[in-house]
């Protein structure tokens, strides 16, 4: 789970963290970069859920280490 950029109830602090997370993602995986999906499954609402890798880097791990993402396994989300 990452901070939202917009939407009902999104604080300025959450928006700012969302911008930071987006910028990290763009640095790891610039637009047009090849992306590899691993462990592909269907999620709760039949959406595709997978581990994403770009250039041998896991954006998930990078965002978690920087505190710009939280583990999420369904259920109620915590605020930012």
Image (cartoon, rainbow, N blue to C red):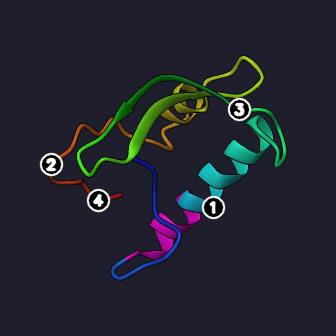
Q: Which residue is mark 1?
A: 19
Q: Quadrant of the C terminus?
A: bottom left
Direction from residue 16 to residue 67 in the image, left or right: left
Under circle 3, the secondary element is loop
x and y, in percent, of residue 68 in the image: 51, 44
Reading the chain from its start, which is encountered first: label 1 or label 4? 1
Under circle 4, the secondary element is loop
Does the stretch in magenta take in 11? yes
Under circle 1, the secondary element is helix
Q: Nearer the viewer, residue 50 or 19?
A: 50
Residue 60 sits above or below residue 80 on the image: above
Residue 27 sits above or below residue 78 on the image: above
Residue count near mark 4 (Cα–Cα under 10 Å), binned few <14, some 14–19, many ≥20: few
Residue at 40% of width from left, 75% of height from top?
A: 10
Q: Which residue is mark 3?
A: 35
Reading the chain from its start, which is encountered first: label 3 or label 4? 3
Q: Which residue is mark 4?
A: 79
Label 2, label 1: how many angstroms apart (C-alpha)?
Answer: 25 Å
Under circle 2, the secondary element is loop
Nearer the camera: disc 3 or disc 4 = 3
Residue at 61% of width from left, 32% of height from top?
A: 59
Q: Which residue is mark 2?
A: 75
Reading the chain from its start, which is encountered first: label 3 or label 1? 1
Provide the residue span drawn in magenta.
10-17
> Residue 69, labelled with which disc?
none
Reading the chain from its start, which is encountered first: label 3 or label 2? 3
* Secondary structure predominantly adopted by residues drawn in magenta: helix
Label 1, label 4: how many angstroms apart (C-alpha)?
Answer: 16 Å
Nearer the camera: disc 3 or disc 2 = 3
x and y, in percent, of residue 56 in the image: 72, 17
């Amino acid at each position: 789970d990452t901070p939202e950029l917009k939407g009902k109830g999104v604080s300025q602090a959450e928006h700012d963290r969302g911008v930071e997370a987006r910028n990290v993602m763009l640095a790891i995986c610039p637009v047009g970069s090849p992306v590899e999906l691993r462990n592909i499954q269907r999620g709760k609402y039949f959406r595709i859920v997978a581990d994403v890798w770009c250039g041998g880097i896991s954006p998930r791990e990078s965002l978690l280490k920087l505190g710009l993402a939280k583990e999420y396994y369904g259920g109620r989300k915590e605020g930012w």
